Image: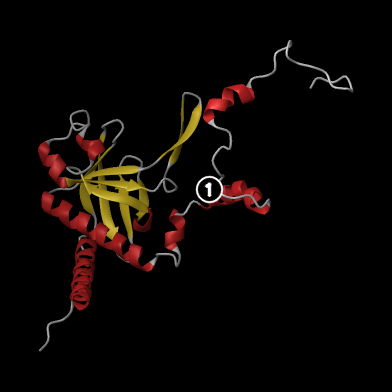
Amino acid sequence: MANPGPWRRACEQQRAQAIAGKALVRQVADWGPEAGTLVDIHTGVHRPVTYWLRDDVRAFCVFDRDDTQVRVYSCSQMERVDGLEKATEVVARQFFLGLREEDMRKGILITMERSAHGRHVVQQGHVGMLRAQLMLLSKSSMHQQDLLGAIRAINAEFLVHDRPPHSGDAFCQLSDDRDFEKSISGVFAGGEDWPPAACPVPISELSTTLDPPSPDSAGTNDNGYCS
């Protein structure tokens, strides 16, 4: 039997990863509500919360016991999901956030898109948008790995199925292209060559060409104007 080609092997590996990812998502969703700790990345305040992952709507839910509200964070609006040990903004402030080494191994950081759950802030007279970031401490490093893998598996599904038909065009700066076309349209419309030819006047003669005539050397023509 002939060995499968690299393309077929890659497809089989991708299919196996997708099946394993779906199984992990179902496993984490079957946990139900889990107790955890939410850490404010700006103030370092620790608050007990209850969290769970919903497989049906592809969302991560957090119940804050202080304000008794359930906040739903869609996985499709998550920009980045990292473990705390890999999150540079957390590692740099580990001491000020009151995080131990054990906390770093069992926590995750979810960074939402700027348009999702962001809030307006005023600093030095300027209004800006502060994106939402969730720092969650689970009860163990095993739970952290499973939760991190399940959310990433859901995000991978969105990248495959919700990709627009012309996603590559999103990275093309069309405004810059239009400005460039406008700037050179007059050159080509006038029949001039592009790029322009070299300066016809030698550099050594530029000083004599550009210097204005002195009053003594300026003469007048027959009409009385300066020549």
Q: Residue at x 18, y 48 (%)?
A: 138
Q: Residue at the bottom extreme?
A: 1
Residue 132 vs residue 55, the one in the foreground: 132
In the displayed structure image, the side of residue 5 where residue 43 appears, left or right: right
Q: Residue at x 22, y 71 (%)?
A: 14
Residue 146 position, x and y percent, is 17, 57
Residue 210 position, x and y percent, is 63, 24
Residue 59 position, x and y percent, is 33, 58
Q: Residue at x 14, y 40 (%)?
A: 103
In the rendered view of the protein, which quadrant contains the N terminus? bottom left
In the image, is residue 11 above or below residue 38? below
In this rendering, the count of numbered labels is 1
Quarter of the figure with residue 92: top left
In the displayed structure image, the side of residue 15 where residue 213 appears, left or right: right
Residue 115 vs residue 183, the one in the foreground: 183
Look at the numbered disc 1 and give the secondary structure of its residue: helix
Residue under circle 1? 176
Quarter of the figure with residue 211: top right
Residue 26 vs residue 167, the one in the foreground: 167
In the image, is residue 156 above or below residue 184? below
